[in-house]
Image (spheres, rainbow, N blue to C red):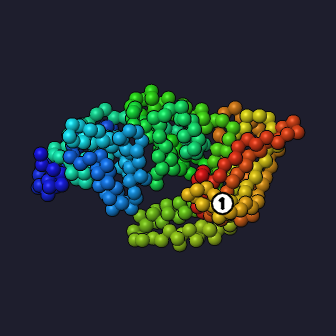
Amino acid sequence: MLRVATALAALACTPINAQLFGPPAARGVLLVGEFRTRLPYETALQRLDRYYEEQIGRKIAVALPRVASNIHYDVWHDMWISFQPAGEALAITMKHAGDAVTARLGRGWMMEIAGRTQGELPIEFKELPPLQSAEADLFASRKDLVQALAAQPSMTPVLTWEHAGLIVSAAPLAAITLAFAGARGVHHATITAESAAAAKQLLATLVTASSKPCICGVYSEAAELDDEIGRAARDKAEDTAQKLSVVNMDPKVIEGQLRAEPEMQKRAAAVAGYSVVRYRIDKPYVRVNIRWTGLEGYNREDGKFQAEREAGQSSIAAPRMPASGPPLSGRTKLDALKPGAYRVTLEGELAGQKIKIDERDFWFDGKRFEEL
């Protein structure tokens, strides 16, 4: 059979409704593409390793991690790819959940995979009923979700540069993505599964896990204000450019004007140096203590650090214990908040005893805290 590597030039001359793009996909679809190659499994992976490194500068272990036996997940394209023996050949099946636009793009991505692995034409494309989704804002980290799904071995955490968190299942098909939903420690979780019931069940599991006593999130008030000013400046620059037909209105100029306003200067002074811990408790503590510790010389590869330093602490007397709703907040004035690693300890006082409620390590990049 004609191989993809020798047929791409011919495809360029075929009508627009041919193999690469095909007719417009239906709204909401699970696009499946399957082809065969004579390459062995390991050789195919080596070819794809070069492909991802050329295209996005990442090795296959990061760009196409293994999530089940002979099944990988393309983090770049959000696509499941399985490699299964088929006699003397290797059957490669790709699945991408999307809409009319991404399904059309998905055909192109699948053609690229086939070309890199010497796949045989024609690729068999099928459009199956779409996966179902559920979503919610959660005060929970990637680690919280991984722990909540520990009893479901098919759910595999995947390192990602595309999302704040990613957990994938190959069978049954499911994916959980986390995105930052503002600077207040909130993550927006989107669950995609084979049925609406399965998606809702996964979401219920995550909501229950995020309701336990814990440190739910951390954010810098100063960084949050900076983000607010930046967004306001960009919006005003776009609005001004449209009204006055001005080209290249510089948001930085507007941002400087906003920062110079007396009211904004008061707000900046009020939040300078303050960071906030969002937390939940399940006991009527007399007092809750929050302690920040800087981890000097922290190495993100092995989690080791050279020294600890006290960065700040605060206490909240008799905090209320809400049965539901958003978590509580505790402000702490830090001596010097700079990019690096921090350990946050949450402690409660009850009946003359101090009880450690939770302790977590975070990395601060100058804007957001990411749990380590």
- Quadrant in the picture for residue 357: top right
Q: Where is residue 161 in the image (x, y as percent from the top left)?
A: 46, 54
Of the pair 324 and 236, the residue shown nearer to us: 324
User: With respect to residue 292, does 242 lie above or below?
Assistant: below
Q: Can residue 272 be seen in this view?
A: no
Question: Residue beneath label 1, please?
Answer: 305
Kind of residue sitting beneath label 1: Phe
Of the pair 74 and 46, the residue shown nearer to us: 46
Q: Position of residue 65 (x, y in %)?
A: 41, 48
Q: Where is residue 133 in the image (x, y as percent from the top left)?
A: 43, 35
Where, quadrant-wise, is the N terminus in this rendering? Answer: top left
Q: Residue furthest top?
A: 197
Q: Residue at x 42, y 41 (%)?
A: 67
- Tell me the crowding category of disc 1: few under 14, some 14 to 19, or many 20 or more residues within 10 angstroms, Cα based: some
- Quadrant in the picture for residue 174: top left
Q: Which residue is drawn at 20% across and 46% down?
A: 38
Q: Where is residue 364 in the image (x, y as percent from the top left)?
A: 61, 59
User: With respect to residue 68, does 184 lie above or below?
Assistant: below
